[in-house]
Image (cartoon, rainbow, N blue to C red):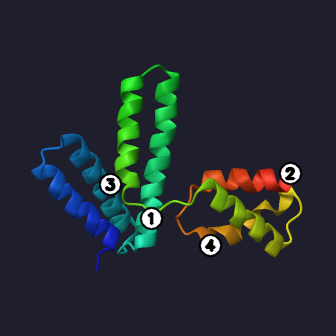
Amino acid sequence: MASPIRHLIEEAVKTSMRDRNKERTSTLRMALSELKKEEIDKRIELSDEDTIKILQRMIKQRKESMSQFRDAGRDELAEKEEFEILILEDFLPEQMSEEEIEILVTETISETAAKEPQDMGKVMGSLKSKIKGNADMGLVSKIVKEKLLS
């Protein structure tokens, strides 16, 4: 059975096609295409967790592109990337706030008895299972680094 998130994306494609929203339809179809590609490549049926990871990877790529377009003065392309990010984020679980992440990082650092930057891998490994796609791991990594350096 396909993941519930994938089903939501498929329904959103139908709705956006009925509404004649070309940009939204295009972005959602691209997401479905990426999910299908992953299923074919790995010969598996994606779980919601897999689907979330793929959507997060797509969002990360768009954020990098958006930054490069802004640096190059190509604001119209940056806005397109930003629009795609907003559409993709609709299908992710509620993201944790920075404060919630900081609390979780502090707890995990004390649980793992981490004291220095070399312990970062141990802390990140423990956090990954606790966060399960509910936060940007780049931000989590930054917070862990700051806490271990202070």
Q: Mark 4 or 1 closer to N-term?
A: 1
Q: Mark 4 or 2 closer to N-term?
A: 4
Frontmost of labels 3 and 4 is 4
Side of 113 where 101 appears, left or right: left
What percent of the width, then of the height, locates residue 50? 44, 68
The amino acid type found where label 1 is placed reads: Pro
Which residue appears at 39% of the width and 38% of the height?
Answer: 81
Mark 1–mark 2 CB contact (< 8 Å): no
Which residue appears at 63% of the width and 54% of the height?
Answer: 98
- For mark 3, give the secondary structure: helix
Side of 70 where 34 appears, left or right: left
How far apart, in angstroms, are the residues tagged by discs 4 and 2? Answer: 22 Å
Which residue appears at 20% of the width and 56% of the height?
Answer: 13
Q: Which mark is residue 31?
A: 3
Q: Name the residue under label 4.
A: 130
Q: How crowded is mark 1: few (under 14 residues within 10 Å), some or many (20 or more)?
A: few
The amino acid type found where label 2 is placed reads: Leu
How far apart, in angstroms, are the residues tagged by discs 2 and 3? Answer: 38 Å
Q: Name the residue under label 1.
A: 93
Mark 3–mark 4 CB contact (< 8 Å): no
- For mark 1, give the secondary structure: loop
